[in-house]
Amino acid sequence: MRADKQKITRLLKTAKGQIEGILKMVEDDRYCIDISNQIMAAESILRKTNKEIIHAHMSNCVKEAFQSGNENEKIEEIIEILDKISK
């Protein structure tokens, strides 16, 4: 992985903390909308983390594949991940 590991780790730990907080909210029978808002916040951090990883992949791995003439596999990977993201 070529993404900034410290940044990715920090983001994932933040998302983990949010998810643990959501579980506590559910256990405490908190208000549904409050829980939903926290779920959306956790999703947002995970999306941001994924964007960072994909950006690093394209900036490094895909770029190197194009330079070495092995771009077809990397193009297919990007198409597959974009299909998943768009669902």
Image (spheres, grey):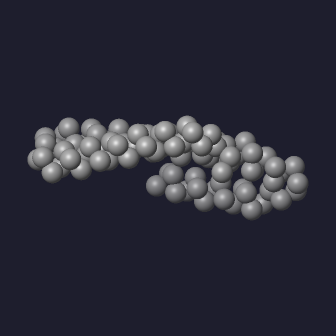
Q: Residue 14 location in percent, x, y?
A: 41, 40
From this viewpoint, which residue is outermost toward the left?
29
Q: Residue at x 33, y 42 (%)?
A: 18
Above or below, 81 relative to 16: below
Residue pushed farthest right? Answer: 68
- Using residue 49 as the reference point, say whether residue 1 is left or right of it: right
Is 15 on the left or on the right of 33, as rendered? right
> Going 46% across and 45% down the picture, which residue do you hit?
12
How many marks can you see? 0
User: Is any part of residue 52 visible from this angle?
Assistant: no
Quarter of the rendering containing residue 52: top right
The spot of residue 41 in percent (x, y) is 35, 38
Q: Is residue 86 left or right of residue 24?
A: right
Residue found at x 75% / y 45%: 60
Q: In percent of the image, x 60 and y 59: which residue is there?
A: 80
The correct choice, above or below, for 74 with respect to 18 in the image is below
**Image location (x, y in percent) of residue 82:** 58, 52
Front residue of this view, candidates 44 and 9: 9
> Residue 35 at x, y = what percent?
22, 42
* Residue 14 visible: yes
Examine the image and state in which quarter residue 21 appears. top left
